[in-house]
Amino acid sequence: MEQTRDSVLRYGESVDCELLNFVVMLLGSLTFWIMDATADDWESLDQIQPVVDKWWKPTARLVVAEEIVRLVRAGLFEEMPHQDRGDEELSAAAIISDPILFWFGMTAKGRKRWEQEGATIDLSD
């Protein structure tokens, strides 16, 4: 099945199907695992992608990059200060084309949400 932005469940979205909701909360969400990758340091797409693929599910780089941009715009992520990436605007395409130029970390607001969701995840299997 091809992944699209619309097929990805994000943090805070509700699902009518009780079973799907249970599975998603058990494994966390795409948003959670992207944020989890940045729990202790600034990370680029190259460090975030393997965490998502291992702990959530194999996910297209474009989907992960789009979610990173959404997190920045929502105030849950920020770019590392003093990056020398020129005047290039933050976009999924730019992140994919040269990931080493884009480093991200959680904001205080993002960390609070990440900690809230982390308390609901059961990894004991």
Image (cartoon, rainbow, N blue to C red):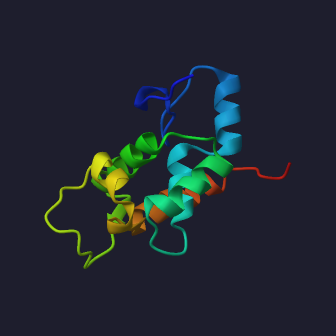
Is 92 positioned to the left or the right of 43 in the image? Answer: left
Is 124 positioned to the left or the right of 1 in the image? Answer: right
Q: Residue lying at the far left in this picture: please name it.
A: 87
Q: Quadrant of residue 86?
A: bottom left
Q: Residue lying at the far bottom in this picture: please name it.
A: 82
Q: Position of residue 30 (x, y in %)?
A: 53, 44
Q: Quadrant of residue 76?
A: bottom left
Give above or below for 24 relative to 72.
above
Residue 112 visible in rendering: no
Please state which of residues 27 and 82 is positioned toward the viewer in this rendering. Answer: 82
Give above or below for 100 relative to 26.
below
Please state which of residues 49 and 27 is positioned toward the viewer in this rendering. Answer: 49
Q: Which residue is at 49% across, 60% downward?
A: 46
Task: Give the mark count.
Answer: 0
Please state which of residues 46 and 68 is positioned toward the viewer in this rendering. Answer: 46
Q: Position of residue 42 (x, y in %)?
A: 44, 72
Give above or below for 79 relative to 33.
below
Q: Position of residue 74 (x, y in %)?
A: 31, 51
Q: Which residue is at 28% across, 77% downward?
A: 81
Is 43 positioned to the left or the right of 19 in the image? Answer: left
Image quadrant holding the N terminus, namely top right
Is 51 positioned to the left or the right of 86 in the image? Answer: right
Q: Which residue is at 61% across, 41% downward?
A: 58
Q: Which residue is at 86% across, 48% downward?
A: 125
Q: Residue lying at the far front in this picture: please name it.
A: 97
Q: Position of residue 107 (x, y in %)?
A: 39, 67
